Amino acid sequence: RKEVEQDPGPFNVPEGATVAFNCTYSNSASQSFFWYRQDCRKEPKLLMSVYSSGNEDGRFTAQLNRASQYISLLIRDSKLSDSATYLCVVTSHNFNKFYFGSGTKLNVKP
Amino acid sequence: DAGVIQSPRHEVTEMGQEVTLRCKPISGHDYLFWYRQTMMRGLELLIYFNNNVPIDDSGMPEDRFSAKMPNASFSTLKIQPSEPRDSAVYFCASSFGTSGFTNQYFGPGTRLTVT
């Protein structure tokens, strides 16, 4: 079983829509969680950290569900510029290992 | 700051040739990571360094791959001999601090094609 799994998508949504995707992790002792964004043919960039209490940054909300071992990313009022691949990252309990998911592709259409 | 710098940006080589990829991390960063990304396998961590010392090279696929970090401002990833299955985008990333895995700054990548 992979350490981190994501639905590859693509998620095709119209502008203004709300979209959410999840990332499941296999190790219940995982410690820290993050979302990265990767534009087509570009490098990944940190989007946001995921805190136990959940966190929000503008139109983006990240949440952690430890009981079910997944993190989620919610995007409200989608913009064309949100089209990208979203990668989740999970670190081990002792911070000596981390794992990238394979990414979920989002296409926001006009 | 110029960000993480990688060279070359594109490399096309023939099977069996040696390939050397170069990376200059952001000044002051003490972690450096090498990744490989393909459609089939996604983003894979190959090796990472902390203060120029290799910490985890368990992702290096085989002996044909080697990485060095002779000083804080330079690292290389070498493939010898190269094979067509090595074709991928290779990213270098750097970060700073006790949570070195968190905010990694990636370079633009080197797109390697082995024919």
Image (cartoon, helix red, strand yellow):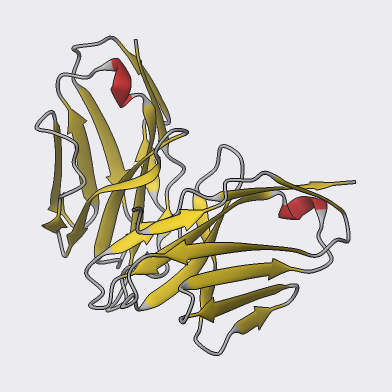
Is A100 in front, or is B13?
A100
Q: From where the camera sits, is residue A78 visible?
A: yes
Front position in the image: B58 or A69: A69
Q: What residue sits 53% from the left and 79% below the top?
A: A64
Residue B81 percent location from the top left of the image: 15, 19
| Point 61% across, 40% down: residue | A40
Q: Quadrant of the C terminus of chain B?
A: top left
Q: Name the residue located 63 percent from the left edge and 68 percent from the top edge.
A: A73
Instruction: Say if B6 sits above or below A80 in the image.
Output: above
Please determine whether, in this image, residue B89 is positioned above or below residue B103: above
Examine the rendered structure and indicate whether residue B99 appears above or below residue A41: below
Is residue B26 at least partly visible in the picture? no
On the rendered structure, is B24 left or right of B40?
left
Rendering coords of residue B108 (x, y %): 46, 43
Q: Position of residue B94 (x, y in %)?
A: 34, 59
Q: Quadrant of residue A29?
A: bottom left
Give percent across and percent down for residue A62.
Answer: 61, 75
Image-based side of B95 in relation to A11, left or right = left
Say left or right for B75 vs A8: left
